[in-house]
Image (cartoon, coloured by chain):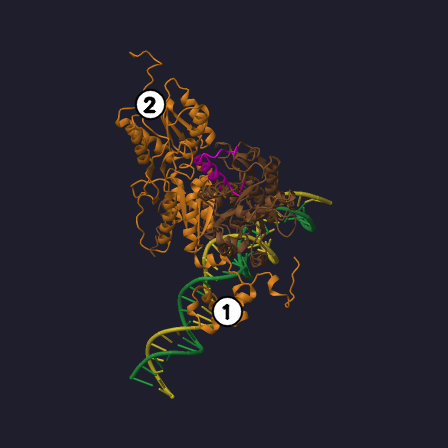
Chain colours: A brown, B orange, C yellow, D green
Amino acid sequence: MPQNSDESVINLFQKSNATLEDVAKASGVSLATASRCLNRPESVRADKRQRIQDAVEDLNYVPHGAARALASKRTWMIGAVLPSLDSSLFGGALDPFQKELAAAGYSVLIASSDYDPERERIHIRNLLESGVEALLLVGADRDPAVYRLIDAKQVPYVLSWVYEPNQEHAYAGFDNAGAATHLANYLLMLGHRRFGVMSGFNEGNDRAQLRLKGVQTALAAKSITLDPDSVYERKFSVEDGRDVFRLMMSMPEPPTAIICGAAPFAYGALFEAAEMGVAVPDEVSVAGFDDLWLAPHISPSLTAVRTPRREMGEHAARYLVSKLEGQRVAQLRAFETKLIVRNSTGPAPMPKKIDRPPTE
Amino acid sequence: MPQNSDESVINLFQKSNATLEDVAKASGVSLATASRCLNRPESVRADKRQRIQDAVEDLNYVPHGAARALASKRTWMIGAVLPSLDSSLFGGALDPFQKELAAAGYSVLIASSDYDPERERIHIRNLLESGVEALLLVGADRDPAVYRLIDAKQVPYVLSWVYEPNQEHAYAGFDNAGAATHLANYLLMLGHRRFGVMSGFNEGNDRAQLRLKGVQTALAAKSITLDPDSVYERKFSVEDGRDVFRLMMSMPEPPTAIICGAAPFAYGALFEAAEMGVAVPDEVSVAGFDDLWLAPHISPSLTAVRTPRREMGEHAARYLVSKLEGQRVAQLRAFETKLIVRNSTGPAPMPKKIDRPPTE
DNA sequence: CGTTTTTTTGAAAGCGCTTTCATAATATCT
DNA sequence: AGATATTATGAAAGCGCTTTCAAAAAAACG
């Protein structure tokens, strides 16, 4: 390895491999004092402080994170593993999460699990090895061994996107089932009795499970059972939303209301309806989850449950920070969802008597 | 700190503060051998390897990243600072970037700059302190001091979203100006002569600058100058797209074609057009950048330049990995953009003779 | 079998920083 | 001014790992 030891080389282009020891030497203090100067400047006398800071500048010194972490037992890193990075769905929580943490001096290590529990496990493990001091996860449903691993490392974590009133975990989420029930009740109130549900794949996705369950709860209260044939599990995509909408509408007795467990389904349904010439909401109502930016602009505008992405990200960050700083942490509550009623939902259509014998 | 030193405690709930030395002791080998066993298992004899691996399991051993990094001079971390994490725009590149890197054993530290150069600088510096081995950035236009800092640390980096044929930086991007020129030429070919442009804020955003320049180039070739009044700089949002569309259409001589420097503008324009009853493309054509998922579904479907987000993310990752592994790295080329023509653009409308004296 | 070559191993020296603990310097008080 | 209380400093001991280097063990050889 070629080593340029020409002392007169101009600073600007100097490799900055200076260590704190170099800084100490250059400013004529001990290593300990130099270290102190970086961490608690007020604890070192003004004249030396100046000399040290000058040396830092001169030598282009950049602290060595790993060394610092090893000695201080603080990495100032927090991990987040999300199902996907690609949509604005989780990004909407990640962005404030990161900002809040950055403000407190933490960096965030991310990974996307692609909705795959095994991949998530591996990422969590890697993050733990990297020394993250805390974790943000999505959902609660995972192999107990994963929680054991995290607990063994004594790493605080918060589960987003879900909420359960038990104290086993820290949640920064919302009540998926409740929100779904609320949405279904709204549709029931409009007179709907035949429902279709588009759900995400349930495996390893408790949010999807809970939403489905929430719908069933509401319907059960009216003694309506949800025919398994009218529940479709698909991966989240607009195309799947379109396909399923078409399938549903070609059933002998199509639903009068379609509940979409995620935004892409709802948009897909709306696009397909437009293309098929199905009137929304006159012939069929469509409602969804995740009130993304498009919802108010699309035509008809989409009735949807607003999920508190920003709140989850922010509060998760604050919770973890105060936990790490050893402050008393407020127990996290469920964040509120809100049903935003727009134009894609309306009263159930009158049964078409024309198609069938009037007596029946 | 209460310390449970009961040796008979069940493993499952044991804190895993075991160090490699503990593992070594438990399996009756030296620290060195234990270390080797983790890093190059084949270099240690099978029987000992088994004993060591068992001890790792038993003790719930998790390597200490910082210590490893300090000793080996490898952090296996790569940093990315993006203008925003919240949209699927940068997420669309980040996701494949992260996946590609994870496959090669790297973790990614992210930060969002919020389009603020100063904040970006700070994040870059923090990432460098954290010991990232490489960096992904967006755009090329930044204070030379930032590049000096990165170079001083000898950290390879790649600039995404832009491309310049010079060799000063590594690019994983595309030709913004060229794509804009292409788009403008297409509209010129359709007979358009009066243009409106919606641009992102140019400050610190070379992508926006280049796109604007690209449009101007195309128009200049036809001796059309772009009236400064018909260029609007806004932050990226659907609402701004709506506002600007309204402004443009209320000009005495509204443009017949509107070029949107980013997706939200175009959608905003389309929504507003629908609301105002302005026919697209009959009265005005609208074309945009960033062919996001919505483009084909919206009505009218959006003519847009597809930006190679996935390619950028993937190739940036591959480039950095091979650079770090010391392999010969292929010089990155510009990735292709593609103009996807849909229904939001059409021939320039005939001048309305009715409104004005026919002689003029 | 004794030798030479090859493969495995362990002792020990760091990696670059923080932090304790004792000492030196300075400030505060009779 | 001398005694005492504060504050600023430096020496040195790690933090948990990797990696060299030399020695030990095993394999291959004549």
Asked whether A267 falls inside the magenta stretch, the response is: yes
**Which residues, given as a range, are shown in magenta?**
A258-283
The residue that disc 1 covers is B52
Instruction: Check the picture and name the quadrant holding the N terminus of chain A.
Output: bottom left
Asked whether A284 falls inside the magenta stretch, the response is: no
User: Which disc, if any, is residue B349?
Assistant: 2
Residue B258 figure quarter: top left
Whole-percent x, y for residue A4 in the image: 34, 52
Whole-percent x, y for residue A205 in the image: 54, 50
Helix, strand or loop status at disc 2: loop
State which chain disc 2 sits on: B
Q: Amino acid at mark 1?
A: Ile
Instruction: Check the picture and name the quadrant holding the C terminus of chain A.
Output: top right
Vertical placement of A358 versus A116: above or below?
A: above
| Crowding at mark 2 (Cα within 10 Å: few <14, some 14-19, many 20+) | some
Q: Nearer the viewer, residue B15 or B342?
A: B342
Whole-percent x, y for residue C25 in the image: 57, 48
Q: Does C3 sit left or right of C24 as displayed?
A: left
Q: Does C5 sit left or right of B73 as displayed?
A: left
Dots 2 and 1 on the same chain = yes
State which chain disc 1 sits on: B
Visible in this render: residue B197?
yes
